Amino acid sequence: MPNQIMIFLLDTLLSLFSLALLLRFYVQWSRVPYYHPFTRFLVAVTDFIVRPAGRVIPSWRGLDLSTFVLAWLAQFIILVGVNLLGGFGAGSSMFAFALLALVKLASMTLNILLISIIVQAVLSWINPHTPLAPVLESFTGPVLGPIRRYIPPIANFDLSPIFAFILLQVLMMVVENLQRQIIQMF
């Protein structure tokens, strides 16, 4: 029972923190303004560890890689911690955990895109001028833009979110299959 509680707390807290770090990375990558409330929240939550890590982990082409590396490290700690607390021992390969942590980040990225597309579609019907709209557009623009070029709106109805949703679901299946293959290899 205590191990289950520890696994739950470790997984929940570090997953949320990893999500915040990953969102901070994508907010910076998609050039959401620093003074947007969403960006300020992510910076406030993660700055205590990103700032010191930024001194050690260099940025690359204007991207703050320390946030990505820290998100990966949080996923790695989750996998190792759950493995140890679950009683599986340290027999598993650290390389497998490192690969699985990277795959988990890919899965989280696809989930972020999926949820962003759904929220953006719903908000476009309810309140298209919400302050969250520019953030969602910056997240979904790289995915929806190319689809919109090939599938124009039909009677003022944008079908690109539907096709993006299908594409992201297929990519999620590929990522899940990759995760199963890594687990079977090690």
Image (tube, rainbow, N blue to C red):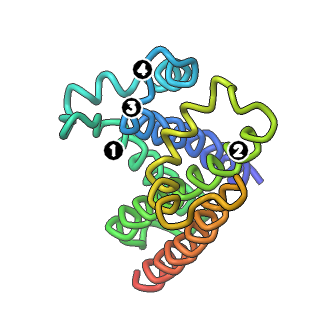
- Taking the spot 57% from the left edge, 50% from the top edge, the residue there is 112
Mark earlier in primary sequence (1, 2): 1
- How far, Cα to Cα, is label 1 from label 2? 27 Å
Label 1 CA crowd tier, 10 Å (few <14, some 14–19, many 20+): some
Compared to residue 59, the image places residue 152 above or below, namely: below
* Dots 1, 3 in contact, CB < 8 A: no
- Secondary structure at badge 4 equals helix
Q: Which mark is residue 48?
A: 4
Give the amino acid type for the residue marked by disc 1 in the picture.
Val
Label 3: element kind: loop
Disc 2 + disc 3, Cβ < 8 Å:
no
Element under disc 2: helix
Return the residue at label 3: 31
SS label for mark 1: helix
* 97 or 124: nearer the viewer: 124
Which residue in the rendered view is the most extreme toward the right? 126
Q: CA distance from mark 2 to mark 4?
A: 29 Å
Q: Mark 2 or mark 4: which is in front?
A: 2
Examine the image and state in which quarter residue 41 appears: top right
> Which circle marks residue 69 in the picture?
1
| Of marks 1 and 2, the one in the foreground | 2
- Say whether disc 2 or disc 3 marks the residue closer to the N-terminus: 3
Q: Is residue 150 above or below residue 44?
A: below
Whichever of labels 4 and 3 marks the residue nearer the N terminus, that label is: 3
* Of callouts 2 and 4, the N-terminal one: 4
Say whether marks 1 and 4 touch (CB < 8 Å): no
Q: The residue under label 2 is which amino acid type?
A: Val
| Distance in Å between CA atoms under marks 2 and 3 | 20 Å
Task: Using the numbered discs, state the Cα–Cα distance from disc 4 to disc 3 in whole angstroms.
Answer: 21 Å
Q: What is the distance, in whole Å, between disc 1 and disc 4 at their CAs?
A: 15 Å
The residue identified by callout 2 is 119
**Figure quadrant of residue 66:** top left
